[in-house]
Image (cartoon, rainbow, N blue to C red):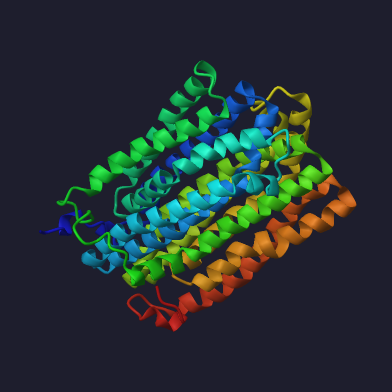
C-alpha cells in the first residue's frame, strides 16, 4: 500500500509560522476547551453542591495530577517517537509505537486504578481532606478511577492522532468531549441530583464517546498509521524508549502532585478547608493560561521532532523562538487578569464572600511572575523534543521540587497563609534563571550544527 500521499511531509518544508498556526491552533483550542470544561465543572459543583465541595474537589488535584502523570509517561514519549519516525519515514516502526500506546496505557491505567481505589481514603486524607470534605473527594474519585483506562487511552491516542498530521480532528474530538460534558454535568448534578458524582460521570462518558471515534479512525487500514495484527504485543524496546522520553513530563506531573499535596497541607494548617478551596479556584484560573501554553507546546512538538529527525536544525530553532514569543504573550495576559480583576475572576465560582476574598488575594499574588512562565515551559519542551531527557527532567523539576517545596515551609513561617502564595512567584523567578542558563548552553551547541549534520555532536540521541 502506498502511503506517501498521507505523510505530513509539510513539517519539513512549509513555513514555520504557518505550521505552528496549523498545529498549535487546534491544540490550543482543544486545551482551552478542556480547561473551560474544568472551570465550568467547578462552577456547577460550587453552585450545585456547595463551597466545601469545591474544597473536596481541590483535595483530589494531587491524585488527578498523578493519574495524568502516568498518562503522559506513555502519551508524550510515544508521540515524540512517532514524530521522529515519521520524519525518518519509518512507517512500520510508527505503527508498532501506535500499538504500544494502547498496550502501555491499558496496563498502567488499570494498575493505577486498582491501587488508588484500594487505598483511596488514606490517600485523600494525606492529600489534605478533612471530615468535612472527604465525602466529596471520595465520591468524585471513585467514578474517575473507574474510568481511568478510558481516560488514558483517549489522551494517548488523541496525541498520536495529532502527531500523525490530524491536529484539527484531534481538536474536534477534544471539543466534543467538552460540549458533551457541559451538557451532561448539569443534567446529572441538578436534574438527577447525583451531586459531585454526576460531574465525574459526565467526564468519563464524554471521553469514552471520543475514544470510540478515535479507535474507529485507527482501524482504517488505508491510513498510513493504523491498527493491524501484531502491533499490540508489548515491545520492551518501544516501551523503554517511550517511558524514557516521557519521563520528563511524568516527573513534572508527579512533582505537581507532590507540590499540590504540600500546598494543601500548608493551606489547611494556616487557613483551613476554605483556603484549600481558594487554591482550587485560583488553580483553575491559572491553569487556563498554562493549558494554552501546553497547546503551543503540543503544536511545537511534531514540528521540532520531525525536523530534528530530518536534521533540519535551523527550523528547530525557528519554531522554538516563535513558540516562546506566543507563550509569553499568553502568560502576560494571565498576569494582567490576576492583578487587575482578581475579584470578578474568582466570583464566577462561588457566592461565598469569605471564599471570594481568599481566592482573589491568592490569585493576585500567585501570578506575579507569570509572564516568564511561558518561556520556562517552552524551553523545557524543547529539550524533550530533542530527546535530551536528563536536561528536560532537571528543568521540569527545578521549579517544583528544588525551589517551591522548600519555600512552602520557609515563607509561611514569616508571612503565615500569605507565605504559601508568595512561594509561587519566587519559584517561577528562580526556575526561569536556571532555564535561561541551560538554554544558553544548548544554543551554543545547536549553533555548531548545520542542516544535515549528525546530531550526535550534541551528545544526545532520540
The answer to which image quadrant residue 47 occupies is: top right
Instruction: Mark yes or no: residue 180 visible.
Output: yes
Which residue sits furthest left?
Answer: 1
**Residue shown at the point (70%, 22%) measured from the top left:** 351
The answer to which image quadrant residue 254 occupies is: bottom right
**Residue shown at the point (52%, 60%) measured from the top left:** 250
Instruction: Mark yes or no: residue 379 visible.
Output: no
In the image, residue 205 sits, relative to residue 445, either above or below, namely above
Residue 178 x %, y %? 44, 33
Q: Nearer the viewer, residue 16 or 394?
A: 394
Q: Is residue 387 left or right of residue 65?
A: left
In the image, residue 405 sits, relative to residue 43, either above or below, namely below
Q: Nearer the viewer, residue 38 or 366?
A: 38
Residue 435 x %, y %? 61, 66
The answer to which image quadrant residue 353 occupies is: top right
**Residue shown at the point (44%, 62%) measured from the top left:** 318
* Quadrant that contains the N terminus: bottom left
User: How many dots with numbers?
Assistant: 0
Amino acid at each position: 500500500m502506498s502511503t506517501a500521499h498521507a505523510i505530513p511531509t509539510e513539517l519539513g518544508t512549509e513555513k514555520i509560522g504557518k505550521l505552528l498556526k496549523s498545529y498549535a491552533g487546534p491544540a490550543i483550542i482543544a486545551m482551552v476547551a478542556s480547561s473551560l470544561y474544568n472551570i465550568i465543572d467547578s462552577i456547577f459543583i460550587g453552585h450545585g453542591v456547595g463551597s466545601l465541595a469545591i474544597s473536596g474537589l481541590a483535595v483530589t488535584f494531587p491524585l488527578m495530577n498523578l493519574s495524568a502523570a502516568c498518562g503522559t509517561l506513555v502519551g508524550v514519549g510515544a508521540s515524540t517517537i512517532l514524530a521522529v519516525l515519521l520524519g525518518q519515514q519509518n512507517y512500520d516502526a510508527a505503527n508498532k509505537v501506535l500499538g504500544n500506546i494502547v498496550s502501555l496505557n491499558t496496563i498502567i491505567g488499570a494498575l493505577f486504578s486498582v491501587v488508588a481505589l484500594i487505598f483511596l481514603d488514606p490517600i485523600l486524607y494525606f492529600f489534605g481532606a478533612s471530615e468535612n470534605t472527604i465525602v466529596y473527594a471520595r465520591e468524585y474519585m471513585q467514578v474517575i478511577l473507574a474510568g481511568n483506562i478510558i481516560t488514558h487511552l483517549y489522551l494517548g491516542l488523541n496525541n498520536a492522532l495529532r502527531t500523525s498530521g490530524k491536529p484539527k480532528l484531534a481538536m474536534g474530538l477534544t471539543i466534543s468531549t467538552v460540549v458533551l460534558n457541559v451538557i451532561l454535568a448539569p443534567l446529572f448534578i441538578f436534574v438527577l441530583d447525583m451531586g459531585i458524582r454526576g460531574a465525574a460521570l459526565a467526564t468519563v462518558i464524554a471521553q469514552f464517546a471520543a475514544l470510540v471515534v478515535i479507535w474507529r479512525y485507527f482501524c482504517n487500514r488505508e491510513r498510513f498509521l493504523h491498527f493491524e495484527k501484531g502491533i499490540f504485543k508489548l515491545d520492551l524496546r518501544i516501551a523503554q524508549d517511550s517511558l524514557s522520553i516521557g519521563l520528563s513530563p511524568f516527573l513534572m506531573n508527579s512533582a505537581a502532585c507532590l507540590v499540590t499535596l504540600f500546598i494543601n497541607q500548608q493551606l489547611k494548617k494556616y487557613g483551613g478547608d476554605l483556603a484549600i478551596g481558594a487554591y482550587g479556584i485560583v488553580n483553575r484560573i491559572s491553569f487556563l493560561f498554562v493549558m494554552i501554553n501546553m497547546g503551543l507546546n503540543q503544536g511545537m512538538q511534531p514540528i521540532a521532532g520531525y525536523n530534528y529527525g530530518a536534521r533540519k536544525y535551523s527550523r528547530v530553532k525557528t519554531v522554538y523562538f516563535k513558540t516562546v514569543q506566543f507563550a509569553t504573550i499568553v502568560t502576560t495576559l494571565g498576569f494582567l487578569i490576576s492583578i487587575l480583576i482578581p475579584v470578578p475572576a474568582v466570583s464566577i465560582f462561588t457566592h461565598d464572600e469569605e471564599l471570594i476574598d481568599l481566592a482573589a488575594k491568592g490569585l493576585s499574588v500567585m501570578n506575579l511572575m507569570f509572564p516568564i512562565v511561558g518561556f520556562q515551559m517552552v524551553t523545557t519542551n524543547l529539550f524533550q523534543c530533542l530527546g535530551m531527557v536528563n536536561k528536560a527532567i532537571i528543568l521540569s523539576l527545578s521549579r517544583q521540587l528544588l525551589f517551591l517545596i522548600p519555600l512552602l515551609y520557609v515563607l509561611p513561617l514569616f508571612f503565615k497563609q500569605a507565605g504559601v502564595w508568595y512561594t509561587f512567584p519566587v519559584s517561577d523567578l528562580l526556575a526561569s534563571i536556571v532555564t535561561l542558563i541551560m538554554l544558553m548552553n544548548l544554543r551554543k551547541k545547536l549553533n555548531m550544527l548545520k542542516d544535515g549534520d549528525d546530531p550526535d555532536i550534541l551528545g544526545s540521541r532520540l
